[in-house]
Amino acid sequence: MKPLDGIVVIDLTRVLAGPYATMILRNLGARVIKVERPGVGDDARHFGPFHNGESGYFASINAAKESITLDLKHDAGKQLLGQLVGHADVLVENFVPGVMEHLGLGYAELRRINPRLIYAAASGFGHTGPGARMPAYDMIVQAAGGVMSITGSPEPDAAPVRVGTSIGDITAALFTAIGIVSALYQRTITGQGQMVDVGMLDAQVAILENAIARHELTGQPPRPLGTAHPSITPFQAFRTRDSWIIMAAGNDKLWHALCECMGREDLLGRAELRTNDLRTEHRAELEQELTRSFKEKITAEWQQILERAHVPASPINTVDKVLALPQILARHMVVETSFGDGTKLKIAGNPIKMSSFEDETKIDPVPLLGQHTELVLGSLLGLDAAQIRALRAERAI
């Protein structure tokens, strides 16, 4: 049994932040009913790469959900959503604030239908404050929230660099999922639902972690350092004879182990490198010394040497190599789903391992647009085939 077995989620989200949050809930056992626009669906269905017209982007975060189509601008479509809410535990949406209220489907309206409903809204800037109704994309909040200012090359004239995954959307999704499961727990005590309001910009500020403390204590805004750590040294990438290796000497014990395994015991005797703070102060000189040594061998050789010395290190793996890592495979972090025509697709597995259930190695297929409309309206609302045909004729579904 999974922890969210029996929980019904109405998913009004699209593209990434919301669908990623509901994917987490599905991985934990919830039944996710994805409500999409008739004939159009989630915008992500139109993002490549494609397989026979089906989006790999969409597939990667929407497998095993149930897709129904409702026109929420149609009175009958709104009524159907209200009826579904009466059978649901959670509703998730990521519209610009005000859209659901304009449709007459905001939290105030839906809680009257179901006081136990957890209503979760993931938006760019949250539902309060002067910028609440501004539109947002991942790169916008990476820039606005400061993450982009500490990412990339340390060179003064270097161009800004976006984090390679959509960290603005994904962090908002994680906080949304945490908020939902927390609200579900609180409901077991109070019997009442509540609204969960997560802004992508807020989430970016939340993950700035020690950058905020560094600014407050030094009075200087942190700058990009490439792969280097702002307060631990050496803790970065080094060029080897054939590529790059990442290593992290996170304490004095590891510093000693690093110098010994590299044959650089001479560095241990240098007063300006005796402590981590001193090594950080003299990072540029130390980087030159270590770079000269790392260039003597290829990455694979250094990886073996550092592993034997128990110094954390890794090559910079490309995605194809990640998917073949024995540790990743052993942890079932690559699982199989399929497109509508049965073609198999590998996607990321569930990183939350719990003793109450086994990892999935195969996941139900990616839903076609509206594939489950009849099933959901029939099983949850009791509508018969004639009623569903009439709703189709009205273009409500």
Image: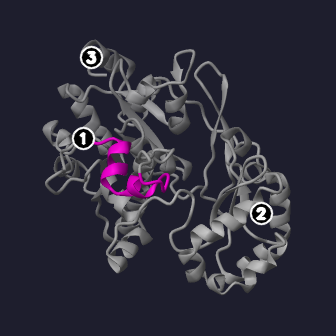
User: Between residues 354 and 129, which one lies in front from this camera angle?
Assistant: 129
Q: Is residue 85 left or right of residue 165?
A: left
Circle 2 or circle 1, nearest the eye: 2
Q: Which residue is mark 1?
A: 135
Q: Which residue is mark 2?
A: 293
The residue type indicated by label 1 comes to Pro
Asked if the stretch drawn in magenta spans residue 142, the answer is yes
Question: Residue 35: which disc?
Answer: none
The residue type indicated by label 3 comes to Arg
The residue type indicated by label 2 comes to Ser
Identified at 25% across, 53% down, the residue is 126
User: Between residues 270 and 85, which one lies in front from this camera angle?
Assistant: 270
In terms of secondary structure, where does tag 2 sit?
helix
Q: Which residue is mark 3?
A: 395
Residue 176 visible to an observer of this rendering: no
Circle 1 or circle 3, nearest the eye: 1
Residue 94 image offset from top left, x and y in percent: 31, 43
Specify which label sits upstream in the sequence, 1 or 3: 1
- Asked which quadrant contains residue 40, the reply is top left
In terms of secondary structure, where does tag 3 sit?
loop
Identified at 36% across, 78% down, the residue is 218
